[in-house]
Image (cartoon, grey):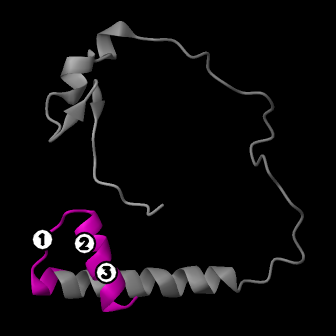
Amino acid sequence: MDIKAIKKTEDLAKLVLSEQRFNKLAQNFSEILKYINLLSNARVDNFEDNYIASGLKNVGVKDSVQKEYSLTGGQATANSVKEKNGYIVVPRVIKG
């Protein structure tokens, strides 16, 4: 992974990394990308598609609100840097 991409990731995540930590992160990213490339090139021609490994069908949990774990709007935005109309405002990451 090139230095420019890691710097951009550092900026987007609002991190301030020491040079030593930055270099270690670059090394880790490179190792992860090598592994992903290895997986991308793996031959899987002889395998059938298997979308549900467990064999279970229509397994789900009914959605329900548990009030004891819910936050009010004020609690949810209390620690945010910027808030507008009850929503947390964050810097734009995607151009457009």
Badge 2 is on which residue? Answer: 10
User: CA–CA distance between discs 2 and 3?
Assistant: 6 Å
Question: x%, y% of residue 8?
Answer: 30, 76
Q: Which residue occupies 90% across, 76% down?
A: 46
User: CA–CA distance between discs 3 and 1?
Assistant: 12 Å
User: CA–CA distance between discs 2 and 1?
Assistant: 7 Å
Badge 3 is on which residue? Answer: 6
Element assignment for label 1: loop
74 in relation to 53, above or below? above
Q: Which residue occupies 27% across, 41% down?
A: 89
User: Residue at the bottom extreme?
Assistant: 2
Magenta residues?
Answer: 1-21
The quadrant where residue 48 appears: bottom right
User: Residue at the left extreme?
Assistant: 18
Determine which of the numbered discs, if any, sits on residue 16 in the image: 1
Is 16 a magenta residue?
A: yes
Dots 3, 1 in contact, CB < 8 A: no
Dots 2, 1 in contact, CB < 8 A: yes
Question: x%, y% of residue 32?
Answer: 45, 80
Is 69 a magenta residue?
A: no
Element assignment for label 3: helix
N-terminal-most mark, 3 or 1: 3
Element assignment for label 2: helix
Q: Which residue occupies 88% across, 78% down?
A: 45
94 in relation to 53, above or below? below
On screen, residue 32 versus residue 40, left or right, reads left
